[in-house]
Amino acid sequence: MVRRRSVKDDTSSEEEEEEEVSSSDEEDEDSDFSPWEATTRKGKKITKAAPEQSIARSHTAATLTSSASKKKSPSQPRSLGKKEGKRGGGHGTVPRKAAAARTGTTSPGTLAGRKRRKLEREEDDEEEGKEEDEAKEVYDEDEEEDDDDEPEGKSRGGSTRRMTGKNQRKTKGLNVTGVGNSKVDKVLEEVRQLMLRSRRDDAPNPTLADLGITTVREVSDMAPEGVLFEIEKTILAAAGMILRGEGFSYQVPTRSATNQLYIAELDRIVLSDKVATRAFLNPREVRKTAITTRIMQLVHEVLSKGIHITKRDMFYTDVKLFRDQKDSDVVLDDVACMLGCTRSCLNVVASEKGLVVGRVQFEEDGDFIDCTRMGVGGKAIPPYVDKIACIQSDAKFILLVEKEAAYMRLAEDRFYNKYPCIVITAKGQPDVATRLFLKKLKTELHIPVLGLVDSDPYGLKILSVYMTGSKNMSYDSASLTTSDIKWLGVRPSDLDKYGIPPQCRLDMTDHDMRTGRQLLQEDFIQKNPEWVKELQLMLKMKKKAEIQALSAFGFQYITEDYLPRKLEKGDWI
């Protein structure tokens, strides 16, 4: 005789199973499985972690379904769970033979019953396979989203930027657009050869000591403590003169044009060691001596506080004494030269003027800067160049542009994306910050610099300031000059070569002619015969043209035709 299990026993047993499953689910929800859970397109919450957890939960759901159907019809034999017949057990399930023994029944032996059970098992297996595939798909999608949400410049393992997923075509964090294009590679082949030659020939520049030159004055970078010491030493010496009844004075290096010296081995202008006495008792020097003392006082205050100010800030501290900012600016350079430090070491800087855009990244005082994502206008070159670090770039060259108008055309057309480069402008006459920044890029990246200036004497003069330095700041030429800049254009020979229309050519004035003749006499011009040839052609034609003259062929002619042709032919001198 077979004993039947009571409905009450089954119900209580099933309630216990439901409580156990509910408790298990609550524990799973409380545990930290957030990185491993996902939701299928059917709205079911599934796990993406260990497969055995997914199977166990499927078994549990099947058992609850079976129990619910039995509650509706207690007289029917207990139906098997979804996985009972196949798995033979599991979390919350009962094997087929054990279930039959408990209920005193056997599974229907008819053919229809066997077919029905077979179809159910196949449907169950198919549904489980879909759920596992969906779980894997959601898991893969979440993994990709996790990679995409990762902060730029950092990976899970440290501070190195990840180069996987959609970033796998990036070089040093820069999106390499155009690289790999056969046409672009052909255009840049001459640039690549120039870069290889410059890197091969890139040797440390000789110093004044190496050349045995001792009759020049040159400044160097100095820590704030060193500058403070020099200021205090100078003021104490002046105080001693006053106590002796002599009247104080300063020994200031002469920065006139006659005290400048061009050294061909260094390819830059330096300052000779001639000095002049600036005495307070001299009526012609009394005001300038007072300004010198006031400037040193302000610099001492700024350095003691560890801050930076602009030259305009300094001027407005004592307008009645300075009268004109030019007077305070000139004396500021005198003080730097007198103390033997660079002007940037005084923590007095000029306002931002230069701009940079293109394929370069760096850290500015700890902030990450990507110059490909600074908008159309690019990034202002900071006056505190000493705070720039960790420079990265995949650029093939630096394009140095004289005019802001040409710079804006290059930036708006994203020229640097098609032809990987860094575009820089100082909006005319170069300032100290732009010259320091260009020097820093050239020194760290070891890539060539190509100059794009107007075809007139002033364009060539601006280019020479970047290369050999200015006479006004010759005492700091070692840190401000960038050697071996190539003159890409616009050159006098380009006017006929590229067919610049006559209406876009301007007549040179008498002042232009005088400036051109003076440049021909300069040693740094005479050193380059090709520059001499171009300048002579300019003076012979008596014609000049600006970069914007190329717009006669179309506003984008410079980026789509002129520069690519120049780069492909290696047409620079």
Image (spheres, grey):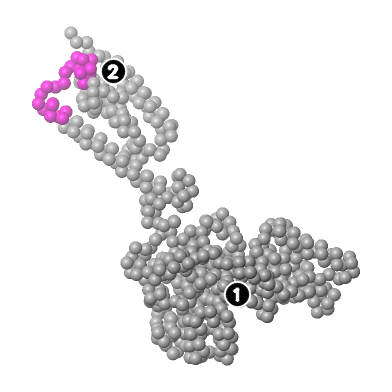
Label number found at residue 215: none
Q: Which residue is mark 1?
A: 263
| Front-lying residue, 533 or 127 | 533
Q: Going 54% across and 80% down the picture, which residue do you hit?
A: 525
Q: Magenta residues: mostly which secondary structure?
A: helix
CB atoms of marks 2 and 1 within 8 Å:
no
Chain part drawn in magenta: 96-118
Marks 2, 1: nearer the viewer: 1
Mark 2, other Cα within 10 Å: few <14 / some 14–19 / many ≥20? some
Quarter where residue 124 is shown: top left
In the image, residue 438 lies at what x, y percent? 54, 67
Q: Is residue 261 above or below residue 130?
A: below
What amino acid does circle 1 point to? Ile
- Outermost residue toward the top? 1
In the image, residue 441 lies at what x, y percent? 52, 64
Q: Is residue 299 above or below residue 59?
A: below
Is 117 a magenta residue? yes
Q: Which residue is mark 2?
A: 10
What amino acid does circle 2 point to? Asp
Q: Going 26% across and 14% down the picture, which residue do you hit?
A: 6
| Front-lying residue, 352 or 94 | 352
